[in-house]
Image (cartoon, grey):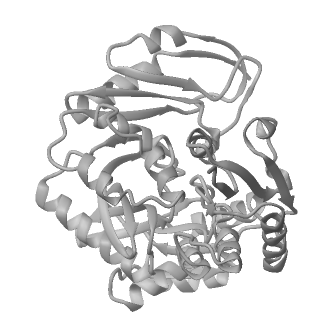
Amino acid sequence: MSKHVMVFGGFFPLHERLVEMGASLTILTTTDKIKAHYPKIYKRVVTLEKGAKREDWIAMAKAIDEIEKVDAIGAFQDYLQKEAAWAAEALNLPFDNTADVVRLVENKNLMRDRLRAAGVDKIKNAVINNIEEALAFVSEVSYPVILKPTDSMGSTGIYKIENEKELREKISDFKSKYPHLQMYMEEFIEGEEFSVEAFSKNGTHYVYGITKKYKELERFVEIGHTVPADIRSEKEQEIKSFVEKVLTCLGVMNGPTHTEVMISKDGIHVVETHTRLGGDMIPELYSYSVNNKVDILDLVARHTLGENVMEEFKKHFKGEKEIFASIFYKIPEKLGVVKRISGLSEAKAKEGVQQVELSVKEGDKVTELLNSFTRLGFAIATGRTAEESLQRAKEAINSIEMEIEE
């Protein structure tokens, strides 16, 4: 018998997997997120206004359940996870984590407070409302510092600040560009960045991969990833143990997580964590790294439908890897309107290249690199070494020429 799954928010590829497995879907989201393709996959499309109250989400979930009994609830992005947890509790259905855990993970200030209180990570932090509070925080920790929102997506609004002049400029810029977001500051962590991909079942955490990250240095927007990260086995084990402590400290119980960490001269520190799969095609990279023997999206879909897939994560992601996979992004070098694009088919034909996609077309406007959503496209490539896969991805995406008119 087909299961009725109520999904909150997006992540269309995972929703597709659920439908392929025979599930019928009701999507519950906010009105501003409706897409033209919704009627093709969802049995029902139900929306509330952005910022709707807890009781409204629960009432709508109960109404849907009255029409057709809901068997499972899923939320696969940061957006609306808390609302999904509210609905699951009201309908007495399982959900990966409680609303309290989701809030703790989403809010960077709350997360750091918890980790510091537990002795897991000592990085200092503070919510900032004005320049006076920012100066007071800097007097405690010294420059450089990071300014960013307490709660946002896609590397939005991240600034590295080196001195008081920059502090005043960046706070003014933040307020102008992101007036709806809460400012937050933390110590700057110097080091090498990785993300750690894990799956949890009943509070037991299994790290199935460590991803090397590459970022643009001014706005900290991610421009590439390599899996698995080419690191020494003892450092790999140290990272895994640290992330397991982080997840346990935050109360994470079930499902996928994506935790960004920095290895500095004084140890390992959390950048942030998420109760979801990694973005930027990271699940697809891991599938390529095991020669497509397993599809992580399939595993998470099956988990949502009630299967225990922990052993499959352990089976497929262990031991030495013979294949490395990398993604690299094209970022704006010039602003204006795209007049001509060339070299796409040639890029796709290069050795080791698995996928090339552009997010702009001729006639589109190219804006400055503010977050992940303003990148221009990507290439994915595989290789026998981490370096080979990354170089192939870079060469493919950089071979595509865009003529841009200011």
Total numbered badges shown on the rendered structure: 0
The answer to whether any part of residue 136 appears in the image is yes
Quarter of the view holding residue 84: bottom right
**Foreground: 144 or 94?**
94
Residue 129's x, y, as percent? 70, 80
Compared to residue 318, the image places residue 203 above or below, namely below
Q: Give percent across and percent down for residue 92.
A: 64, 78
Q: Is residue 343 left or right of residue 339?
A: left
The residue drawn where x is 45% and y is 58% is: 307
x and y percentages locating residue 193 in the rendered image: 34, 55
Residue 396 figure quarter: top left
User: Residue drawn 55% across and 33% down?
Assistant: 331
* Residue placed most toward the observer, 322 or 343: 322
- Residue sitting nearer the eye, 370 or 386: 386
Q: Quadrant of the C terminus?
A: top right
Q: Residue furthest bottom?
A: 117
Is 199 on the left-hand or right-hand side of 76?
left
The answer to whether residue 9 is left or right of residue 45 is: left
- Vertical placement of 278 versus 226: above or below? below
Q: Position of residue 83 (x, y in %)?
A: 70, 70
Res. 129 in view:
no
